[in-house]
Amino acid sequence: MNEMLENLRVKNPHIQIHSVFDPEFERFGEVLDVSEFIGLIEHLDKHTFVPSMGNEYVPHLAALEDVVSSSTVIHDTFGMVPLEYGYVNGNNSKLNALEFHKSSEINVCVTPLVLLLAHIDDIENMTFTSSKVTAFFIPENTAIEVYSTTLHFSPCKVVDSGFKCAVILPYGTNMEFISAKGKQGKYSEFLFKTNKWLLNHPENTRMVELNATNAILGENIEIYY
């Protein structure tokens, strides 16, 4: 892990990269006991694939629920609400957008990857400056909770073969496109999908075509490896 992290730091002088085990991560989430997710990791490793281009995101796959349904960590994180067990596999290397949910999220990293994170308090006047992003390297076979106040989006790959990451959220999250009915919520203009508020970077043209709100100013940060 240390060798890969040091290599990333050398190749990315434009952004400081911390380890997820550093105290800087405590503002954004916490590292969980990965032993309860071994079956999930093995299933994703054997039965899912990284697409040749882009990312593949599946919000819920019933087979994943079957291998983690008795997890104490999940029980204590979400308090027994109905959950979806999905994954994102891919080749992304850029920030592109930031999202948040009105709930925590569990990520189980099958491969090493980098997450680009920020705090909801860093949104000012309904915009966000990308220089406020903090990068975190997460080694393979690591589970984390991402807090509801944490801005996040797609992982970034750190090896040629891409990344694999399980995503556990309250059921229904990210499943349907919706928009705000009014302006009752502070961040209502960012409501994009069910339980998903999204700030887009203008370079992310796919989300522009889907009517996402362009709210990220500055560089569309890229991670090199």
Image (cartoon, rainbow, N blue to C red):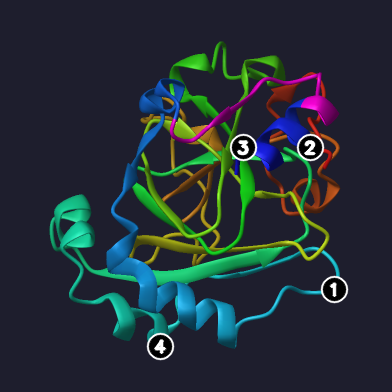
Frontmost residue, 3 versus 40: 3
The reply to whether callout 4 and callout 2 are in contact (CB within 8 Å) is: no
Q: Please, what secondary structure does the residue beneath circle 3 have?
A: helix
Could you tell me the amino acid type at mark 1?
Ser
Residue at 27% from the left image edge and 67% from the top image edge = 36
Residue type at the position of mark 4: Ala
Mark with earlier residue (3, 2): 3
In the picture, the disc for residue 52 is: 1
Q: Is residue 131 left or right of residue 118?
A: right
Name the amino acid, label 2. Ile
What residue would you read off at disc 3?
A: 2
Question: Along the polypeptide, which appears first: circle 1 or circle 3?
Answer: 3
User: Which tag is nearer the camera, tag 3 or tag 4?
Assistant: 3
Q: Earlier in the sequence, mark 2 or mark 1?
A: 1
Dividing the picture into quadrants, the one containing residue 29 is top left
Element at label 2 = loop
Q: Which residues are magenta?
A: 10-21
